[in-house]
Amino acid sequence: MRLLVINWLDRENPQAGGAEMHLHEIYGRLAERGHDVTLLCSGWDGCAPETVLDGMRVHRVGGRWNFALHVVGAYRALRRAGGPFDVVVEDINKLPLFTPLWVAERVDVVVPHLFGWTAFREASWTVASTVVFAERAIPWVYRRCDFTAISESTRSDLLARGVPVERTRVIYCGIDSGAFTPLAEARSSIPVIAYVGRLRRYKGVDLILEAVAAMQDRRVEVEIAGTGDDRPRLEALAASLDLGPRVRFLGFVSEAEKSALLRRAWIVSLTSPKEGWGITNLEAAACGTPVVASDSPGLRESVLDGRTGFLVPHGDVGQLAAAYDRIIADPALVTRLGTAGRAFAESFTWESAADHTEAHLLQRMREGGHAGGDHFSRAQRHHS
């Protein structure tokens, strides 16, 4: 297949996160299998406009805020240079780019998650409103497209918005069970609760700090790995809660450092109101570490409540603190939850995700045609 994947970011972008890792893990494998994969994305100051990552040719145009203004022209240039693509894949993990309105080929859509009203927790009213209204147009603009969600939660969100059930499927993320492995002797002698992810207001990291301050066990330390513009607020909150040196902000960590953190923690915690999946939960489980998370869309699928960790009502600091205390008071429970977590994580592989994606795209290619045909044909006739 000759594939074009369109996403706002690639994995080298300083703003990249789990959605970009998901994209590279799957489409990099398709490139390794001999498929011709091009990734069209935005750039950043000082980046190379073209490179090869994971076997994919990467073309970067525009920047974080104006990618949408450059992507159409870049797509047309790629098509003129190499001919039509078999399938164009749009990964919607920020604003939709409405590719069916300007892409000639069949469009397939990948959706990690949609922000919905949670956008107002992070962005200004103007930006959040733009996100909400753009997402509301998805069922109409993409009505001839097939959707791949990374969780049942995201699929349910799409169905609730009016996407036909027959056009949706779930292909779960994978986990590198070789890179993330248990190591019992690595567990810290002092109880550690870890967070790994972006430091953004909508991630709810403040709930972790408030719950630790409310815990009965005062030995507990918190290690927060990640970068983001919410760090100053979180540092101020930790100081106001008198947590002092018990909280360490680690900043950006390498994959090796992340693995070491997940192994030494007694608990890994994610407390956002909505996620596509919660891949850090699986990475922690693969390391044999229990997870305590909000009972939120996406997160509730990557934690088996009572088996690999605990789910608590989102925003309930009291129950969050109680779950932390319960696990830390019982080292045998840490081991039991961690052992079940490892078994759970091993059932998710990137090879399986790539297999399902490849089979789906081959079927789409055999079907021929294109999702945005009417719009594109009218535009072509007008241009002529």
Image (cartoon, rainbow, N blue to C red):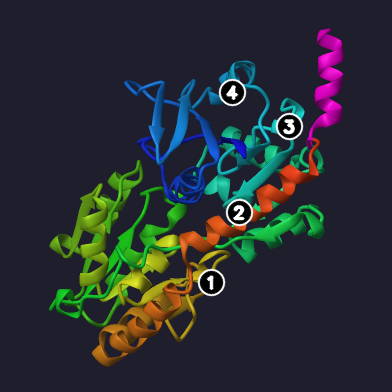
Q: Is residue 217 above or below residue 5?
A: below
Q: Earlier in the sequence, mark 4 or mark 3?
A: 4
Name the mark on residue 357. Answer: 2
- Label 1 residue SS: helix
> What amino acid is at disc 3?
Glu
Residue 376 colored in magenta in the image? yes
Look at the image and tell me in which quarter the N terminus lies.
top right
What distance separates the C-alpha of mark 3 from that of mark 2?
A: 18 Å
> What amino acid is at disc 4?
Val
Camera-side residue: 335 or 89? 89
Q: Earlier in the sequence, mark 3 or mark 2?
A: 3
Residue under label 4, please give it.
71
Query: Closer to us: mark 4 or mark 2?
Result: 2
> What amino acid is at disc 1?
Arg
- Label 2 residue SS: helix
Mark 1 nearby-residue class (10 Å; few <14, some 14–19, many ≥20): many
- Label 4 residue SS: helix
Can residue 224 be seen from the camera position used here? yes
What distance separates the C-alpha of mark 2 from that of mark 1?
A: 23 Å
Residue under label 1, please give it.
300
Q: Which residues are magenta?
A: 370-384
Mark 4 nearby-residue class (10 Å; few <14, some 14–19, many ≥20): many
What distance separates the C-alpha of mark 1 from that of mark 4?
A: 35 Å
What distance separates the C-alpha of mark 4 from that of mark 2?
A: 24 Å
Query: Closer to us: mark 1 or mark 4?
Result: 4
Mark 2 nearby-residue class (10 Å; few <14, some 14–19, many ≥20): some
Query: Closer to us: mark 1 or mark 3?
Result: 3
Q: Earlier in the sequence, mark 2 or mark 1?
A: 1
What x and y, as percent, mark residue 56? 46, 36
Q: Is residue 344 above or below residue 360?
A: below
Name the mark on residue 105. Answer: 3
